[in-house]
Amino acid sequence: MEQNHIVWHDVLITRADRNRLNNHKSGLIWLTGLSAAGKSTIALAVEKELYDRGIRTYVLDGDNVRHGLNSNLGFSPEDRKENIRRIGEVAKLMADAGVLVLTAFISPYREDRDMVRKLFDGDHFAEVFIKCSLEECEKRDPKGLYKKARAGVIKNYTGVSAPYEEPDNPELTVDTECCDIDGAVRQVLEFLSEKRFLATEYTETTES
């Protein structure tokens, strides 16, 4: 289908304008890791801390998104790619609206995560690897999904019957076998402060 009639319309209010109004930098903090590594728990706890500080935030969680926006997608490599593509585009819109977005997705393929990174300008995107061994994740298994995957009930399950490609150069690695939730949250908050995402650290000079 030809779409030559679709034209991009420039906006009058930019992301930089909204960041100045909010007094904090917007962008995307992409948490990746195996199921049960702690992505959602950390993302939600970080969001609560940021909310209490007056930061406009939103968490896009893998399970929640598949209840609505991506309810028509499965777990084949092709569907996983489309899942991540859609989330990246939604997150970019939210960041343009001035929101600091945190995501909690397994997002097993480096290529797909890099695809999202390319949607963002420089330091408005950060990949955070929530590191945890497969053995420990299986021990935790809060939803019983690893057990079902081992039994063949769930197909294409990351870490069991589908691969997980660890990040080569994440901006931050949080090892949840070496720290508790408070320690993990503290690491992410310190990183956000260092990268000047927070209101007390934000200045207009951080905008490109």
Image (cartoon, rainbow, N blue to C red):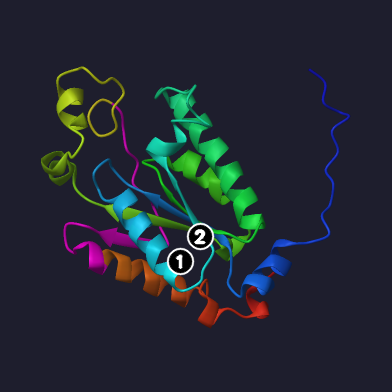
Q: CA distance from mark 1 to mark 2?
A: 7 Å
Mark 1 belongs to which amino acid? Answer: Tyr
| Front in this rendered view, residue 55 or 72 | 55
Q: Which residues are magenta?
A: 162-183
**Seen in the image, is 15 located left or right of residue 115?**
right
* Residue 108 in view in this figure: no
Q: Is residue 3 within the magenta segment?
A: no
Q: Residue at x 29, y 32 (%)?
A: 158
Q: Position of residue 156 (x, y in %)?
A: 31, 23
Q: Residue at x 40, y 58 (%)?
A: 170
User: In the figure, 206 relative to 87: above or below?
Assistant: below
**Seen in the image, is 98 located left or right of residue 8?**
left
- Marked residue nearer the N-terminal end (1 or 2): 1
Q: Are marks 1 and 2 in contact (CB under 8 Å)?
A: yes
Element on which disc 1 rests: helix
User: In the figure, 126 relative to 2: above or below?
Assistant: below
Q: Is residue 173 within the magenta segment?
A: yes
Which residue bears the numbered disc 2? 57
